[in-house]
Each structure stands twice: as structure tokens, then as C-alpha cells.
Image (cartoon, rainbow, N blue to C red):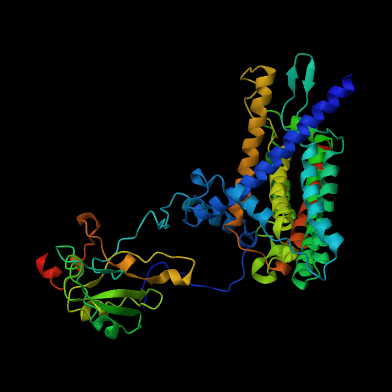
Amino acid sequence: MMDWWLILDKIILVVVIFAISLGVAAYSTYGERKVAAVMQDRIGPNRAGPWGLLQPLADGVKFFTKEDITPNAADKFLFILGPSLFILTALMTSAIIPWGKPLHFGDHVFNLQVADLNVGILYILAVVSIGGYGIMIGGWASNNKFALLGALRASSQMISYELPMGMAIIAIVLMSNSLSIREIVDMQQGFHWNVFYQPVGFLIFLVCAFAECNRAPFDLPESESELVGGYHTEYSSMKLGFFLFAEYINMFISSAIISCLFFGGYHFPGIDSLDLSPNLAAIVSVCVLFAKIFFFIFFFMWVRWTVPRFRYDQLMRLGWKVLIPLSIINVLVTGAWLTFVK
Amino acid sequence: MQLTNRSKVASVKELNWVEKLYLPAIIKGMAITFSHIFKKKATVQYPEELRPIAPVYRGVHVLKRDEQGRENCTACGLCAVACPAEAITMEAAERMPGEEHLYREEKYAAVYEINMLRCIFCGLCEEACPKDAIYLTDRILPSNYARNTFIYGKDLLVEGVEPAKRVDISKRKKDYEMNV
């Protein structure tokens, strides 16, 4: 009997998280255009619905109704597999994020986390790496030189920045003695946010998150001014929509992971002193996490409309010559501090 | 000579280690973009909101009627001759008995067309007109999808008879500034 409850819980949670991920991603496109506009002294989308709030809907309808072109020379199967894989992996990463404190229905405890893997962080790194294949396969299957160049850039960029990202996480893991995201979040209760103990690690992780999401200033794989559209040059209709959408989902998930690893996840200083009932506390904790996530999504956009794109050699130099040595030193210092001082 | 005091001397000096971090510069840039959120927007939301235009603005033409609601135009063709873009064509017709309330003189324009895609809105037709019939107005030519919709016939050019439908062209009159 217990197992059926568990399965029902998880199905509800998966569907809700799926819907929220897609909704947030859709409204991120609207948010991005609004943020871009106000930072450039413009107004932004305001025609579809009140304040342009129906704009994502209009964009979605447009994507679905556009002609779906598959180039003659493209590999038909891989051409479809690329965007599918990319959006699949983007949605999969949300499984291990603890969205809040558990809800209580009588005796039944409803955990707001799909899977509390004891190797949650490794799961993220693994799934994110597979996401790189989506771009690579899509770019290669297009049989177009711009798409291929974009795909090559994406894959080499992802490989280069996964290393310092992993190293930054290792420092966190050393401090918390756990690979489970929920345990890392619970360790940061109160105001013991990891960002205060690991500022360098946070900086490295942030930069790598930008690179992994292919966001400006690391948007070389799709740099429209040099590579037409990069890896999605040949894509049209909803296949293109999948690529663009997956990018925004990645941004959402990255923001969630940054919040969980460095900013206390669903914890907020003073939340325990409010003496709320468990269920209310759970709802407040979800809101706190989402406030942090939305701030980081805004931060992603803010940076995009401020910093110009890196040149490719600058990107590689930053990755291999700056971030990797810095992250190794960070791990060493953290380890030494934990061994000899604490 | 210095025109503004905002110019900065560019240099190719080696960056010191703080500058090499790029972070201070990025934070400075982000402060600038953030401050722009609260600045006045430059956007003019066109169909609802219009930028101020000069009183003598040369927009879409109007064919005037006199006080009794009769068309001024006699289809003399001087505007078509004056038009440097050759945008105006017309066909003349004779006024029949019983049409005196429609046309002021014995001859009138049965067809009067201005090709708005050819027109350069110079106002020479207005200057050439001896009958006070054609004037440019402050109305802006609306956009459209099909080219043939830009050939404006009498249905679009002639002003209405009712006082409310009259088009004010007093600002375009030669003696406007003297009267003001």
C-alpha cells in the first residue's frame, strides 16, 4: 500500500515540476525580452494581452505553425534526435532538486523532491554532459558548416567548463561530507550559506554555469553574428523551439542548483523563528527557493545584456588557464582548512 | 579642440592584475545597465502615440469643398503638370444640370487619383492649384500590405460635406503666419 502512495506522490510531483519548468522557461523568454528592453531604454513586448503577457503563447503558436524543414543532406534520424535529447536532459535535471520542506497530510509525508539521490550532484553532472550530445548531434546532423562549427564550439566549451564546475562542487562536497543535494541544503540552515564559506567556488561555479548554459558572454556556439545561428542554423519550427526552450529550462535549473548549492536552497535566515505550522513553513520554503531562482534568472539576463561575447581563444584561456588552476587551489585550500584548522 | 568633457584617452597600456580580473569592470557595467531600467524610455508607441509634428507638415492630401459643400476642383490638370513625381492623374467631366450643388464650376474631376507610392509630398500640387482645391494635411499616410491600396481615389481624397468631416488646412495657407 505504501508503495502506491509513493508512486502517486512522485507522479504528481513530476507532472507539477514538468509544468512549472515549461512555464518558467516560457515566461523567461518574455522576461528576457522585457529585461533587454528596459536595459536599452525600450518598452519591450506589450501588444499580446495585458503588458504583453500572452507573448510566450503567441511565440509558441508561431513555432508550431511554422514550416518544419529538414535539409536534404541532413541525417533524418539524428536531426530529430538532437533537439529531443537536448530538451529531455534539460528537463531531467529537475528531478533531484529539493523544492522545499516536506508537506504533511495527516500521517502522510509528501516530499517535495522527486528523487533524493545520495549522489545527486554526480547525477546533475552526468545529465548535463549528455545534454552536450544534443547540441553536437543536432549540429552534426544538419550537414551545414555553420552548424558543425557551432556544435564543435559547444562541445569543446562544455568539456572545458565542466572540469572547473566539478572542482567547485568538490569543495562544497568536502564541506558537507555528502553528495546529496538535500543534505547540502540542510547544512546551510540559518544564514550559513555556502557562498560565504566558498566565495571563490561560487564565482567559478557561476561562470561555468553561464558557459554550460551557452549564455552570454559564452554564447559562442550560437553566436548569430558569426555563425548565422550556430548549431541550430538549419532548424525550424518546433525543433528550433525545443533548442531555444531547452536553453531557458537549463537556465531555470542552473538557477535552482546555484540557489541550492550556494544560497541555502529553501532555507532563509529567521524562517525557524517565525514558528509556522509545518505545512505553511513548507509553502514558504518553496516561495523562498523560487525567489532565489527568479533572482538568478534575472541575473543571467542582466549579465547577457551587459557583457560582450568572448573571443574563442579568450574563452579557452579563461577555462583552462584561469578557472581550472583556481578551482584546484580552491579544493586544496578547502581540504587543508578542513584537515588542519577545523 | 574638445567638444565634450566625456571623451576618454584610449591607451594600450598593460592591464594591472586587478583589471585583468575583469570583475570590477563587469560590476561597473552591470551597475550601468541596471541604472537604465529606471531611465525614461525612448519608445514612441506609434499608432496610439504621435510625435509632435510641425504645423506645416506635408502629409496625405485633401481635396477641398467650398462653404456650400461643392468640390473646388475643376480638373484643370495644373497639379498633375506641376507634380515632379508624376503621381497625379485625373479625368475631367462636364457638370450636368442639377449637379450645381456638387461641383462649384462647370467642369469637374470625374476621376482624381494620387499614387501615394510615387508622391514625394513636396507640396507643389498645392502651390500650382489656382482653385484652392488641393492641400496637404497633417495626416500621416497609413501603411498597407498591397500596392494597389496606395492609389488614392476621390473616395479617400475629397473631404466630407458635414462640418465635422471637414479637414482643417488653415495652417497650410500662405497667410497663416501673418494671421497668427
Q: Position of residue A25 (x, y in %)?
A: 67, 46
Q: Position of residue A334 (x, y in %)?
A: 79, 43
Q: Position of residue B149 (x, y in %)?
A: 43, 68
**Count of picture labels:** 0
Q: In the rendered view, would you say B132 is above or below A342?
A: below
Specify the quadrant of the image occupied by residue A115.
top right
In the rendered image, is residue A187 in sight?
Answer: no
Q: Residue at x 83, y 65 (%)?
A: A141
In the current view of this chain or complex, which residue is farthest to the left?
B179
Q: Nearer the viewer, residue B129 or B95?
A: B95
Q: Residue at x 73, y 42 (%)?
A: A257
Q: Nearer the viewer, residue A303 or B164?
A: B164
In the rendered image, is residue A263 in sight?
Answer: yes
Q: In the rendered view, would you say B147 is above or below A51?
A: below
Q: Residue at x 77, y 47 (%)?
A: A90
The quarter in which the C terminus of chain B is drawn is: bottom left
Q: Nearer the viewer, residue A82 or A296?
A: A82
The quarter in which the N terminus of chain B is drawn is: bottom left
In the current view of this chain or complex, which residue is farthest to the top?
A106
Specify the quadrant of the image occupied by residue A232.
bottom right
Q: In the rendered view, would you say A205 is above or below A108?
A: below
Q: In the rendered view, would you say A147 is above or below A192?
A: below
In the picture, measured across the screen, residue A285 lies left or right of residue A6, that is left
Q: Nearer the viewer, residue A74 or A249?
A: A74
In the picture, measured across the screen, residue A268 lies left or right of residue A169, that is left
